[in-house]
Image (spheres, rainbow, N blue to C red):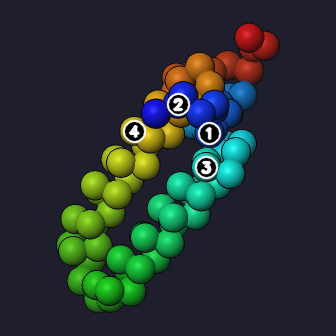
């Protein structure tokens, strides 16, 4: 999946990634839009929102982990 370059760059401290390419931004915006749509579709039904948000979030995290330069791991701010 990361053959087209890195979509995300790792954060300097802690765990996480920041979008650095148009593909990273597109997947991030799509993820947020899907969560917003899910919350509107199941307004007032918290269990359904959570049940729909879990697979969306897991999918987003897997994509981000596979396309992050150096992978997702804890970082202490050291230069690599």
Return the disc, 2 or 1, that comes first in the chain's sequence.
2
Residue 37, position in %: x, y? 41, 80
Residue 20 is left or right of residue 23, and the answer is right
Q: Distance between the residues labelled 2 and 3?
A: 11 Å
Q: Quadrant of residue 29?
A: bottom right
Which residue lies under the disc numbered 3? 23
Classed neighbour count for the residue bearing mark 4: other residues with Cα under 10 Å, few (<14), some (14–19), many (≥20): few
Q: In this view, does 52 lie above or below 67?
A: below
Which numbered disc flags the more N-terminal residue, 2 or 3? 2
Image quadrant containing the C terminus = top right
The residue lying furthest to the top in this view is 80
Residue mark closest to the camera, 4 vs 2: 2
Query: Which residue is disc 2 drawn over?
Result: 2
For marks 1 and 4, the one nearer the N-term is: 1
Whichever of callouts 1 and 3 sits on the residue coming sooner in the sequence is: 1
* Most distant residue in the front direction: 4
Q: Are marks 2 and 1 in contact (CB under 8 Å)?
A: yes
Residue at 29 percent across and 56 percent down: it is 54
**Element type where label 1 sits in the image:** loop
Q: Residue 60 carries which label?
A: none
Q: Is residue 10 visible from the viewing direction of this image? A: yes
Horizontally, residue 59 falls left or right of residue 45, namely right
Q: Are marks 4 and 3 in contact (CB under 8 Å)?
A: no
On the image, numbered disc 1 is attached to which residue? Answer: 7
| Point 43% across, 49% down: residue | 60
Taking the spot 44% from the left edge, 41% from the top edge, the residue there is 63
Residue tagged 4: 62
The answer for how far apart the CA atoms under marks 4 and 3 are is: 15 Å
Residue 15 in view (yes/no): no
Q: What element carries label 4?
A: helix
Marks 1 and 3, Cα distance to the nearest angstrom? 6 Å
């Amino acid at each position: 999946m990361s053959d087209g370059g890195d979509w995300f760059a790792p954060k300097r401290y802690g765990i996480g990634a920041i979008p650095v390419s148009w593909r990273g931004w597109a997947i991030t915006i799509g993820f947020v839009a899907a969560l917003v749509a899910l919350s509107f579709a199941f307004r007032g039904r918290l269990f359904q929102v959570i049940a729909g948000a879990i697979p969306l979030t897991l999918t987003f995290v897997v994509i981000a982990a596979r396309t992050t330069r150096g992978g997702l791991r804890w970082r202490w701010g050291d230069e690599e």
